Image: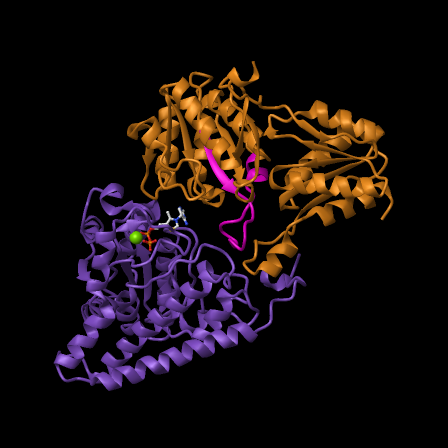
Amino acid sequence: MPEFDEELIMRLYKTMYTIRSFEEKVSEQAGMGMIPGFMIHLSVGQEAVAAGVCAALRQDDYIVSTHRGHGHLIAKGASTDRMMAELRGKETGYCRGRGGSMHITSVEVGGLGANGIVGAGLVIAPGAALSARLRGTDQVAVCFFGDGASNQGTFHEGLNLAATWKLPVVFVCENNGYGFSTPQSSHQSIGRISRRAEAYDMPGITVNGDDVLEVYLAASWAVERAREGAGPTLLEAVTRRWLGHYVDDEDDYRSAEEKAEFTLHDPIEQLERRCIEQGLTSTSQLERIRSEVDEEIERACAFAEESEEPSPEDDPGLIFSGGER
Amino acid sequence: MAEDKAPETQFLTYFEAVRQALKEEMELDPSVFLMGEDIRYSIFGPTKDLHLEVGEGRVLDTPITESAFVGAAVGAAITGMRPVVEIMFADFMTVCMDQIINQAAKIRFMTGGQVKVPLVIRAPGGMLSSSAAQHSQCMEALFMHIPGLKICVPAGPVDAKGLLKSAIRDDDPVLFFEHKALYFASDEVPLDPRFTVPLGQASVLREGGDVTIFAISGMVSSAVSAANSLARDGISAEVIDPRTLVPLDTDTLLASVRKTGRLVTVEEGCLTGGVGAEITALVTSEAWSDLKGPVIRVAAKDQPVPFSPVLEAACAPNAQTIAAAARECVGKN
Ligand SMILES: Cc1ncc(C[n+]2csc(CCOP(=O)(O)OP(=O)(O)O)c2C)c(N)n1
Ligand SMILES: [Mg+2]
């Protein structure tokens, strides 16, 4: 791995492990009824996509996220304490408790929103990219979306617009093989979603989405290309969703054998193995990172727990910016 | 002998009642079929594994593509089929607005009556435990503005079954708003496959002489509890559930207001431009001389539905706010 320096690899490892630890904690707390709502979509198993793509971005680049958006936001640099507080519906949360899991975002780190509407981001990201061009910056917008979302009209409209106007967008399809309970083979007639890029005259690349270095390399290429004004790329990362579609999902549409395979592709373990094999790090160094992260997540939980509920008094400034009613 | 008689009713939840209506109508009419996202899985239950009972070809899981399958349903409806499609959450109707508003609602009129559109769109709406701004909306008022769409808002299992059967047999597009918080409400539901509830017939859930409470969907049971608490204070409230907003049973509503002289409207959707606004306009123009005071509208705040449980609760009406409005209406607050 000559092109990867140790600092980058440790950063990717830490990001992936932070996502894993955060999501597992959310799963545990949701199971205990501590997190309001039932539409909590976790990204355990998909950490490499968020980590690899966001490592290729600058802080001032944008990401447009999905209903399964915790990992994207962590990878973009949001702090886990304010995220945890948001999931608990607290005033200290990034969205002041108004958004929750499906709408969690931090604009200060470049997050333009998680989304409850599948496919919505595919036309918002080109708009952020257009804005960057009009403002004369070289910012890039990344749009995360799923295999299921690639069937919405907005996928086709967004890609066409971005390609026609050569906008600095990277469309990142996290293909985890399912749109909710529906396997990819039942929701579209193609296997490789990146093939659709051809129809819009942009590069289409499929990578192993469980290999963070492969994701990072492909994303870096696409981001630089976008930044230089060469237009959008469709990057498909094939991955696996280990848990149910949402926390209450019985997940009876996937067989036990299929589920047993997931962990064989663990993106975190894979990176760990490679690092140790190539002498880039030691088991104890990785262990130290993990325990640091676990402590951070515990602190985030404590922060969320101690934070205040929002006051039921209205804040009209949240509806119209001038506070009109 | 009593034991020889088949039972006439069955104790069912709201989602089971919806399922029974779908199954009965599919058995009666081969042109009825279902489409929607993950409907075989069925997050709230009404269509779970229904394909195993009525045939694979009649329960179609679609890609995530509301515009395509609602549009396809319009195409199928004008060519001899009776599609019943599900929008997983009513909020996602925005994604296929053109197909509903410009196509389904208008195609009969625009073709000079050459086609009919026997299409049903089932859509769960309303607030349920912190579903937040894009999964909690009540969309019915928005569609009341569009001529050509019929609108059902069943508040319990019996009406859910009876109205859905009528909706499927109806030759016009019907938007059928189920309420997420009602899916596990239960009641004795008639089993006779001929049982239906006609569109356009209100039900009077409680008779009273002091004030009329007009409530819909998820708010009906809260209105009944409010009426019960008002009764303890000597205020006699009449509770009316229109069951369908289009067509609207104006006779029942106006007769009640003529009797009580007072009206409170209750809905879980936003106040401005809501169902209550239309009802208020209707009553003030048709029964002005019978009104003893202003109509009071009880509705959700004019804001997106918040995630936080504290804020969500403060956003929606409840039995207490309904009772308070009724007291104010009769001048006994
Ligand atoms: C417009 C719209 N339709 C349907 C849904 C319900 N829904 C939420 S997530 C989801 C599946 C999305 O699949 P995919 O895009 O592959 O993302 P994944 O969940 O696999 O991450 C569905 C159907 C929605 N939120 N919005
Ligand atoms: Mg998917």
Q: Which chain is orange?
A: B
Look at the image and give the residue range highlighted in magenta.
B120-143
Report whether B322 appears left or right of A202.
Answer: right
Model colouring: by chain
Q: Residue furthest top?
A: B1
Rendering coords of residue A82 (x, y %): 48, 73
Residue A93 in picture, x, y percent from top left:
52, 70
Within the image, what quadrant is residue B298 found in?
top right
Residue A184 visible in the displayed image: yes
Which residue is at 20% across, 67% downward?
A: A211
Question: Which residue is painted at 53% across and 21% down in the image?
Answer: B7
Is residue B139 inside the magenta stretch?
yes
Question: In the drawing, does residue B140 fall left or right of residue A213?
Answer: right
Is the residue B247 above or below the residue A24 in the image? above
Q: Quadrant of the N terminus of chain B?
A: top right
Instruction: Give the left or right position of residue B103, taking residue B265 as reference.
Output: left
The image quarter containing residue B216 is top right
